[in-house]
Image (cartoon, helix red, strand yellow):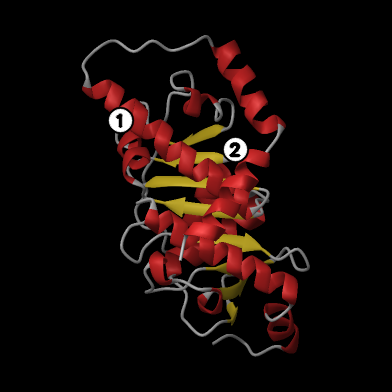
Amino acid sequence: MGDGSIEARSLFDDAAVRGLRNDLALALRAAAQHGLGEGVCNHFSVVLPQRPDWFLLNPRGLHWSEVQADDIVLVDAQGRQLAGRHPSEPTALFIHAAVHRIAAKACVMHTHMPHATALTLTDLRALDTTLSQNAMRFHGRVAVDAEYNGLALDAGEGERIARAMHGADVVFLANHGVIVCGEQIAWAFDDLYYLERACMHQVLAHSTGRPLRPVAPELAARVAAQTLGERMQSDLFFESLRRTVR
């Protein structure tokens, strides 16, 4: 696959890039283990530090639980595959190429994970970041794309989604799913995991039929700052996945 360029093949086999391929594959397998995937759909990507206009992506047709470093593919900002032994999925190319290029995000994780997606079906379309402690870590970091517009099968739809993010780390896509972004794979995965936990807590709380008791926005903002003040816990979580996920 790919255009066979010497630069692409050389970078694809570079030791640092192989490390990124390993980490991206690990994140995918861990997401599958935690029930965050959906069949062979959805996609994770990360840009190459050496070429920010190129990014690594999981291939089409593989269940996340089986993805290894050698399965990851390399594509460019136009969605053209440069290296990798598997094909790429069209909606992945259109969404991720646009988010990397327009929103300038290093790591992009798109899922239809169940509780987060459930909230995109409600009138609010998103998580209330003043409820659980897990939700508060996302206070001030969430955007909502409130209009579902069908499958992202063209560059225009990918660009529309990217612009709807308005620079946020997390975007809830109406009637669709979520996108979680981060500066590195470990941090993005940590946010993805805790976002689904926070959404699950909100869905369960609503199911009780009892009134909910949010905290003041100022407190939620303070918790968000505390969480983002150090990401050692995110790194430790990812290292634990490296030891436990096969």
State which quarter of the image contains the N terminus. bottom right
Q: Residues within 10 Å of mark 2 (few under 14, many from 20)?
A: many
Q: Position of residue 214 (x, y in %)?
A: 43, 12
Task: Decide: is 220 above or below 148.
Answer: above
Relative side of 93 to 197, left or right: right
Q: Which amino acid, by three-letter code, is at mark 1?
A: Thr
Percent x, y for residue 45?
A: 56, 61
- Secondary structure state at the residue bearing disc 2: loop
Does residue 169 appear to the left or right of 6 in the view shown? left
Alpha carbon distance from label 1 to label 2: 20 Å
- Residue 135 shows which numbered tag? none
Q: Name the residue at 41% across, 36% down.
A: 197
The amino acid type, in three-letter code, at marker 2 is Ala
- Residue at the disc numbered 1: 122
Which label is found at residue 168?
A: 2
Query: Mark 1, residues whose alpha carbon is within 10 Å: few (<14), some, or many (≥20)?
Result: few
Q: Is residue 240 visible?
A: yes
- Residue at image x 69%, y 71%? 17
Identify the residue shown where x is 47% and y is 73%: 59
Name the element at disc 1: loop
Q: Is residue 127 left or right of residue 68?
A: left
